Image: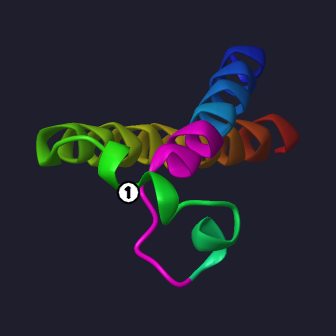
């Protein structure tokens, strides 16, 4: 069970990095430094942004839950 939860945690961590980097920059930050302001017309529609937000939030919830489950598993194994 610990191995399966660890694999879920690793996969969701990698997916979170990718999803956060896919978000459109709000301006003035690191995204502008790397050319984020140039591709603002290619950002897509608001439907795509909303779906990306939902996917990011869902992945974050799974990531957080897997951390809690791993903590509980390690605590019960050590006791």
Residue closest to the eye, 76 or 63? 63
- Tell me the SS state at disc 1: helix
Where residue 57 appears, x then y in whole percent?
35, 48
Q: Is residue 69 visible?
A: no
Tell me where residue 28 appears, x and y as whole percent.
53, 84
Question: For residue 33, what is the image quadrant?
Answer: bottom right
Residue 50 vs residue 78, the one in the foreground: 50
Residue drawn at the location 66% of the way across and 39% of the way down: 13
Instruction: Name the residue beneath numbered marker 1.
Output: 40
Who's the residue at 81% across and 34% down the image? 77
x and y, in percent, of residue 74 in the image: 78, 40
Q: Is residue 26 magenta?
A: yes
Instruction: Decide if residue 49 is on the left or right side of residue 16.
Output: left
Q: Quadrant of the N terminus?
A: top right
Q: Is residue 7 above or below residue 24?
A: above
Is the residue 56 above or below the residue 28 in the image? above
Q: Position of residue 36 (x, y in %)?
A: 54, 60
Q: Is residue 57 above or below residue 70?
A: below
User: How are the colours assigned in the image?
Assistant: rainbow
Q: Quadrant of the C terminus?
A: top right
Residue lying at 46% horizontally and 37% vertically, measured from the top left: 62
Q: Which residue sits furthest right?
A: 78
Residue 20 lies in the magenta stretch: yes
Residue range highlighted in magenta: 16-28
List the single residue furthest toward the bottom: 28
């Amino acid at each position: 069970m610990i191995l399966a939860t660890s694999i879920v945690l690793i996969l969701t961590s990698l997916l979170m990095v990718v999803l956060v980097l896919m978000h459109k920059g709000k301006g003035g930050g690191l995204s502008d430094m790397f050319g984020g302001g140039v591709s603002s017309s290619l950002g897509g529609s608001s439907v795509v942004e909303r779906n990306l937000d939902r996917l990011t939030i869902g992945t974050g919830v799974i990531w957080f839950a897997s951390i809690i489950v791993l903590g509980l598993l390690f605590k019960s194994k050590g006791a």
